[in-house]
Structures are given as C-alpha cells and as structure tokens.
Image (spheres, helix red, strand yellow):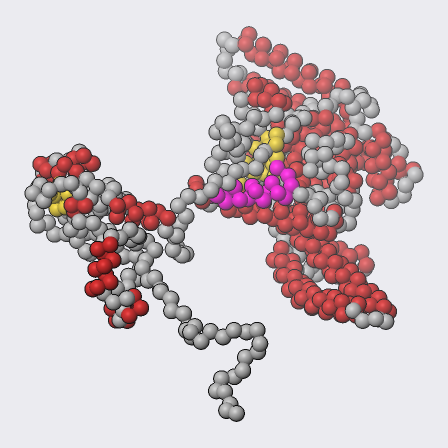
C-alpha cells in the first residue's frame, strides 16, 4: 500500500486546503489631518475605475510609494480661495504683500483685493501707497514685520502675515499653533508666575506702651547676650522669655542692682571706661571745673564709679549689720541679696542708685539727685555773672533767683521723700524701675570684660599667668573658652558633621542588613532565639542612631546660640517694600541644660517672627490687615504708633520665606535675601529643638 504524502490529521479536525498562507491587508498611508474622501461614487466612476485601472492588489509598488503623503504639509490656498476673496474675480485690482514670512527669508506672495482689505482693516489703496515707510507692521506673534527690497513703491503686510485672515488654512494653522505642545527649553522664562499668597498675620495685643515694651526687649537681649558672662540665675531668665509676661519686676530689680554693685565694686578703675562728667555745654575746658563744682556742692570728694559702688554696698551691709554674722565678703553679699529679695528696693536704695547713675552722667534719670541741685546752682551762678553788667534788669534777676531757689527746694524735698520712705516702694512705678534697670545694664557695657567678649580673639592667644594655683588655672580655662571665635566653632562643627554622616551611612547599612536577616530567619522554623537576638541588636542600633542624631542637633543648637550672641546690637532682620520690619528676637532659655519652655503664652518672641508695620495686603480688599482693638486705640492717641504682628510655627515661616523670595524678585529688593537667610536659621533652630528636646511636631 502506497504511503500518503501528507501527514494524517487527528480525527475531528478539518483541513482547509484553499486557505491562503497569509492574509493581505491594505495599509493607509494618508495623513490623518487630510480631508476625508467621499464615500458616494457613481456607477460611471466605478465602471471607469474597473476598466482603466487594475485592482488595488496589483498596483505596482513604485506607483504606491509615489502616491504616499507623509506628514502634514499643506500649502496656503490661492488668493482667490481666501474667505474674503473666494468670490472675487481675477480682474479686480489686488495688493501685493511686500513682507517676508515670519522667521524665514522666503517672501510672501499673497495678494488681496481692496474690498477684502477695507472690510477687514478699513484701509484703501491710496492710504496703502501713501503709507510712510517708517510705519511698523506686526506679525501675528507681535514681532515687527521684515520687508523685502521695495519693488512696488510701498511697504505693506498682508492679512495672513498679520494674523487677520480667517480662511480655512489660516484658521487650522492658528488652532494647531495654539494647541501645539511647547518645546523643551531651559532658558525660556515662564509666561506668568503664580503669585504666592502671604501668610496671615496675627496681631499682637500690646499690654504696655511701645516705649516700655522696647525697654523690656532691650533688657531681655542684654541678659541673653551677657548672662553667661555674669552668671545670671536661670530662674530670672526664664521669667523674661515672654516679653509681656509677669517679670516679677521687684525681684528682677533687686537682682540687677545687686549684680551691678558687686560687679562694679570688684572692678578696678583701670578696668572700667568711665565717661567724663559734663555739666556744662560739653567744652573740655569747662568739664573739670563743672565736676569739681558739683562735688563741692554735694559735699563729697570726686570719686569714680567703682568707688561709689563700693561705698553703697558697704552702707547697705552696715545698715543690716551683716558684718557681725558673716566673715568673708562673698557671704555678706549673698546675704544682702536674700534681704533685697525679701524687702525689695526701697526708695532710699533707689535714690542711692540714682546718685550713681548721675555720677556716670546718665541723662533723664527719673529720680532726683544731688547732682541736679549742683547743676541748678551752677546754672544760676552763670546767669548771675552774665547779668551782672545789666543794671536795669534788677527786678528780672530777682525773679530768676526766686525761680531757681524754688526749683532747688523742690528737688531737695523729693530727695528727702525718697530718703525717708523706708520699705515703701510705691514711689516708683514698674515702668520707672524698668528704666532704671536698663540704665544699669547700659553702664555694664563699659566693663572691660564685656568689651573683650565683644571683640573676641583666637583660641591660640592664651593668657600668660605666673600663678600656678587652682583658681588661676580655672580662670585661664574660662578665658580660653570665652575667647573661642565663631570661626573655630564652625570648623569644629563642620568636622563633627562629616564624621556623623559617615557613621550614619554605616549604621543605615547595618540596619538594612539586620532587617533582611530578621525577615529571612522568620521564614525558617526553629529560629526564634536567633530572631530575638537579631531584634535586640537592631533595637540597640536604633537607640544608638537616635542618640547620635540628638547629639548632632544639640551641637546645632549650641552653634545657633553662639551665633546669636555675637550680634553687637539689636536691629531688624530686614524691611520689605510695604514698610514692614522683621524682628527675630533671641531665645534666652537654655533648653539643653535647664528647664524647658512648655507653658509660654506668647511663644513668638522666642520662636517666631515679629513684624512691625502696616502688614500685608489682603486679597479681597487690596488693603492692609486690621490691627487688634488695643493697637487701634493706641493709633488714635499716637499717629506714629505702628501695628505689631507675629508669625509662629514652621508652616507659616516657610510660607513667609517663599513669599519674600518672590517679592525680592518682583521688586528687586536684594536686602530681603538676608532676611530669608535669617528666617531659615530660625527654622533650622526650631527643627533642632524638636529633635533634641521637645519632639517632632512641637513647633508645627
């Protein structure tokens, strides 16, 4: 039996020997944007195609390739096919375009009839030919039109070049150019910048006058700057964190007076820069005479400020008979401080301090002093000498003499009132006591130790001492620590940051390895002990990484505090174009070594930004925000009063930074860049406090 050439198929499967090996398809190469062809054809057309052309399957390949239309290249319609010119006759006079096509050197060959031009642009042929050549036509993009060499005696841009033609081609082209995706460009500026809304400012309710508030802020900043130098009690500083809080002024005044007297009495005259007293007009030739006359009028010898401070301190200690109970001077001074805390500053004690301030030639001392009497007598004698030659003014001289005597008696009565007041402290208001405290702190700026801290030297310049005692070594170490410059601390912090980053990368790699190991061990039975050991190792590593991070943030806080203490004066962080002043006040609480600040009712003084000025413009009305009712009342009383606002929280401060950056670009105010830098430093400080002390989200 002969073998079959084809393989035997399984039963149930039919074979189709007439099916072609592949199915031929028609590919459409026409552009999607080209107009579709009509589907209705006549019988004659079908018959003609069937007789004249072969079937589509037998069309030669070369002919098919030639008929391809690749891309979307369309030509502008002829002049007779414009929307306004499609019905115009060829014999109608037409105007030739003399412009180049935009962004090319190819001349435009469009022509338009005068009816269409006049209907679209209200121009006639006479106006076009009489047009001045200096007239600038604009392309549809807004750029000036470039004309080819004039051959017709005039320069004119057609409707298509100017974007005024609404034919089919121009309409499609304009729509495609509008919907065309922009090309990638790294140098193109955005067409419009989305304006950033400023953060909402909250008004500060002023509990005191602006003058008293500024006095409080000056005291606060001084104690922050030099509190470590004079070893100020941290419990005193904690009360000053809130500028409008309860400062316990009686206790604060007693402490500042005691600190001033003990500091000044332990300072030699050569270590204290005392200004010369001037009771006259300020001429050097009359200063010594005035000082001698004032000393003679008061019945005292000319003494220096340290000598006067020692005398006052000795009188107060003698009055309380502390020499009988305490042997050394330090114990007596400490006992005097406790007495001042209990009794407060009496009128007599404040009068002694006023005499010391008058000796330092401080102006506007709110308490009468004997120096005022001496000044009045000196002025009266000077007027009598000048009026000695005037014989006819005897009656007027007598009146002046009576007025001067009355003023002197009034000052003497006030001094006697303060001297006999005892423990009655009602003679001075809290505002007056704050003013006296501020004057005492200003005098402390004349101390040589304060001046040396303002102009710190390098750490290599150590002090040579001949004494080898333990006390001298401690003083030398303290002086070396105080003379460390900001640059040295910055280099040390930078070095530590690099070391921390390297260790952090190693610890992260080790943590990932432990996590993978724990996941692998959990998939195996009988590995519970190994999983427990690996988990304990991972927990220890997490604790180590957290401690190292807290150490880094603590160093950041110390660095920030040291930078803030290098400021020599209190000044705003910057000003904007609206007249707002941005103030960033210091945080005087030592969060790393002392108690935290959890109950501050006004945290914006230490952790936010205070803005003094008209505020920001509101989006609805375009005007400044309304201040608080208390500030509005103050504005009615004082036209020069400015509104006080505040911002707190990391979100509002971040929004303020973005707003100031945009305002700096729009208004060209380069000084706002420094303001943004200072606000960024405040943000970094808050982030460090959250990590090292308070926890995440505390200042959000």
Residue at x-position 86% and y-position 42% = 331
- Residue 502 sits above or below residue 82 on the image: below
Q: x%, y% of residue 341? A: 83, 33
Q: x%, y% of residue 700? A: 67, 43
In this orientation, which residue lies closer to the viewer: 17 or 422?
17
* Residue that extends furthest to the right in the rendered view of this protein: 325
- Residue 380 sits above or below residue 620 on the image: above
Residues shaded magenta: 647-664
Q: x%, y% of residue 44? A: 21, 55
Q: x%, y% of residue 485? A: 63, 56
Q: Name the side, left or right, on which 534 lies relative to 486.
A: right
Q: Please identify the quarter of the rendering in which residue 155 is found.
A: top left
* Residue that extends furthest to the bottom in the rendered view of this protein: 1
Residue at x-position 73% and y-position 52% = 692
The reply to whether the magenta stretch includes residue 111 is no
Q: Please identify the quarter of the rendering in which residue 263 is found.
A: top right
Is the magenta region chiefly helix, strand or loop? helix
In this orientation, which residue lies closer to the viewer: 426 or 84?
84
């Amino acid at each position: 039996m002969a073998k079959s050439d084809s393989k035997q198929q399984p039963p149930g499967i039919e074979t189709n020997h007439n099916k072609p090996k592949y199915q031929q398809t028609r590919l459409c190469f026409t552009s999607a944007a080209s107009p579709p062809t009509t589907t209705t054809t006549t019988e004659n057309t079908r018959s003609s195609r069937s007789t004249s052309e072969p079937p589509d399957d037998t069309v030669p390949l070369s002919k098919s390739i030639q008929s391809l239309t690749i891309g979307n290249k369309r030509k502008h319609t002829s002049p007779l096919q414009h929307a306004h010119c499609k019905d115009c006759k060829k014999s109608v006079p037409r105007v030739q375009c003399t412009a180049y096509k935009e962004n090319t050197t190819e001349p435009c060959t469009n022509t338009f009839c005068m009816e269409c031009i006049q209907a679209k642009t209200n121009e006639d042929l006479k106006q076009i030919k009489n047009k001045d050549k200096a007239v600038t036509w604009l392309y549809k993009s807004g750029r000036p039109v470039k004309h080819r060499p004039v051959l017709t005696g005039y320069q004119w841009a057609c409707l298509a070049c100017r974007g005024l033609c609404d034919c089919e081609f121009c309409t499609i082209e304009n729509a495609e150019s509008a919907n065309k995706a922009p090309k990638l460009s790294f140098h193109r500026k955005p067409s419009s910048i989305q304006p950033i809304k400023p953060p909402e400012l909250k008004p500060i309710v002023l509990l005191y006058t602006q003058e008293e508030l500024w006095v409080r802020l000056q005291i606060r900043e001084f104690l922050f700057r030099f509190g470590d130098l004079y070893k100020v009690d941290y419990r005193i500083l904690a009360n000053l964190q809130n500028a409008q809080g309860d400062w316990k002024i009686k206790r604060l005044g007693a402490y500042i007076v005691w600190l001033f007297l003990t500091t000044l009495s332990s300072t030699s005259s050569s270590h204290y820069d005392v200004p010369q007293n001037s009771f006259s007009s300020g001429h050097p030739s009359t200063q010594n005479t005035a000082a001698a006359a004032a000393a003679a009028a008061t019945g005292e010898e000319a003494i220096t400020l340290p000598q006067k401070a020692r005398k006052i301190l000795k009188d107060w200690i003698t009055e309380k008979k502390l020499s009988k109970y305490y042997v050394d001077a330090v114990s007596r001074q400490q006992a005097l401080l406790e007495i001042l805390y209990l009794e407060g500053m009496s009128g007599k004690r404040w009068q002694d301090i006023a005499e010391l301030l008058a000796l330092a030639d401080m102006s506007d001392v709110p308490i009468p002093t004997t120096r005022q009497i001496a000044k009045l007598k000196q002025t009266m004698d000077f007027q009598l000498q000048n009026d000695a030659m005037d014989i006819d003014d005897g009656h007027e001289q007598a009146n002046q003499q009576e007025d001067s005597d009355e003023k002197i008696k009034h000052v003497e009565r006030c001094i006697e009132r303060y001297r006999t007041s005892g423990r009655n402290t009602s003679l001075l208001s809290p505002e007056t006591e704050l003013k006296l405290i501020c004057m005492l702190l200003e005098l402390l700026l004349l101390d040589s130790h304060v001046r040396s801290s303002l102009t710190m030297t390098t750490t290599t310049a150590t002090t040579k001492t001949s004494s080898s005692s333990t006390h001298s070594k401690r003083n030398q170490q303290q002086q070396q620590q105080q003379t460390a410059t900001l640059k040295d601390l910055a280099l040390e912090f930078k070095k530590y940051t690099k070391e921390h980053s390297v260790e952090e990368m190693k610890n992260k790699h080790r943590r990932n390895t432990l996590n993978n190991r724990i996941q692998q061990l959990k998939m195996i039975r009988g590995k519970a002990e190994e999983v427990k050991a690996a988990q304990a190792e991972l927990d220890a590593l997490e604790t180590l990484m957290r401690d190292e991070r807290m150490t880094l943030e603590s160093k950041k806080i110390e660095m920030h505090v040291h930078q803030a203490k290098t400021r020599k004066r209190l000044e705003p962080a910057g000003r904007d174009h609206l007249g707002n002043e941005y103030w960033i006040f210091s945080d005087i609480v030592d969060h790393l070594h002392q108690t935290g600040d959890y109950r501050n009712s006004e945290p914006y003084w230490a952790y936010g930004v205070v803005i003094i000025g008209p505020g920001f413009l509101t989006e609805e009305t375009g005007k400044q925000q309304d201040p608080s009712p208390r500030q509005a009342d103050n504005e009615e009383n004082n036209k020069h009063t400015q509104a006080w606002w505040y911002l707190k929280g990391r979100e509002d401060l971040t929004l303020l930074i973005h707003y100031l950056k945009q305002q700096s670009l729009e208004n060209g105010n380069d000084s706002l860049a420094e303001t943004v830098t200072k606000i960024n430093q405040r943000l970094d400080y808050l982030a460090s406090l959250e990590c090292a002390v308070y926890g995440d989200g505390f200042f959000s």
